[in-house]
Image: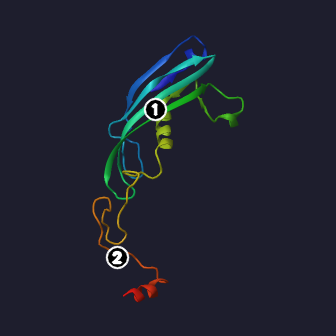
Amino acid sequence: MQLDFTGIFNSSGDVIDIDYLLKLDDFEYSTYKPLKNGVTVKGSAYSKADVAHLDLNVSFDFFGTCDRCADSFERSYAFDISKVVVSHLENEDDDEGYIITENNILDLDDLIYQEIQLFLPHKMLCSDDCKGLCMKCGANLNREECSCKKDVDPRMEALLQLLD
């Protein structure tokens, strides 16, 4: 979706309401494509005190694979984006927190794509207390107990012989 900020930059009181479903079938996370239902984007672009603002709410369902136990899971995410939009900056080093438009046009799809990449955690887990897999037998420790014996520190092996 392309947003034209010309009216907003000219302080004509324009408000652009945003409400659409963004298909991100090509979005890759790790080795899979987790955004099967698309991304819902709602919000507005407006001028306040001669400054152009973009306020958005982004929500989506993430269909993923746990990095610890390899189980599939589904999780809903939502986050807000609040940015100041400018047509140019005097000092190019001060671009943090600003979105710079090209010819007063903002590619909203590209912005959402980048923000989702920044929002998602580096390690995806099915739950915060995921126990993962047994390193010896491969059992999923969330669903079953493993019968593997725990490794003994070789320095303590002599003391364990005294207990026998």
Whichever of callouts 1 and 2 sits on the residue coming sooner in the sequence is: 1
Local SS, label 1: helix
136 or 102, nearer to the observer: 136
Task: Look at the image and tell me in which quarter the C terminus lies.
Answer: bottom left
Image point (60%, 13%), residue name: 11
**For the residues bearing labels 1 and 2, Cβ distance under 8 angstroms:** no
Image point (53%, 13%), residue name: 14
- Most extreme residue toward the top is 12
Give residue 60's position: percent from left, percent from top. 38, 36
- On the rendered structure, is 86 left or right of 111? right
Give residue 49's position: percent from left, percent from top. 63, 16
Q: CA distance from mark 1 to mark 2?
A: 52 Å
Residue to which mark 1 is pinned: 109
Number of numbered discs overlaid on the protein picture: 2
Query: Residue 68, located in which quarter of the rendered image?
Result: bottom left
Could you classify mark 1 by the number of other residues whose Cα lies within 10 Å: few (under 14), some (14-19), or many (20 or more)? some
Image point (71%, 29%), residue name: 90
| Three-letter residue code for mark 2 | Lys
Above or below, 112 relative to 5? below
Q: Would residue 39 be seen by someone viewing this image from the given angle?
A: yes
Local SS, label 2: loop
| Three-letter residue code for mark 1 | Asp
Give residue 146's position: percent from left, percent from top. 30, 69
Residue to which mark 2 is pinned: 149
Image point (57%, 10%), residue name: 12
Above or below, 163 relative to 86? below
Give residue 81's position: percent from left, percent from top. 51, 31
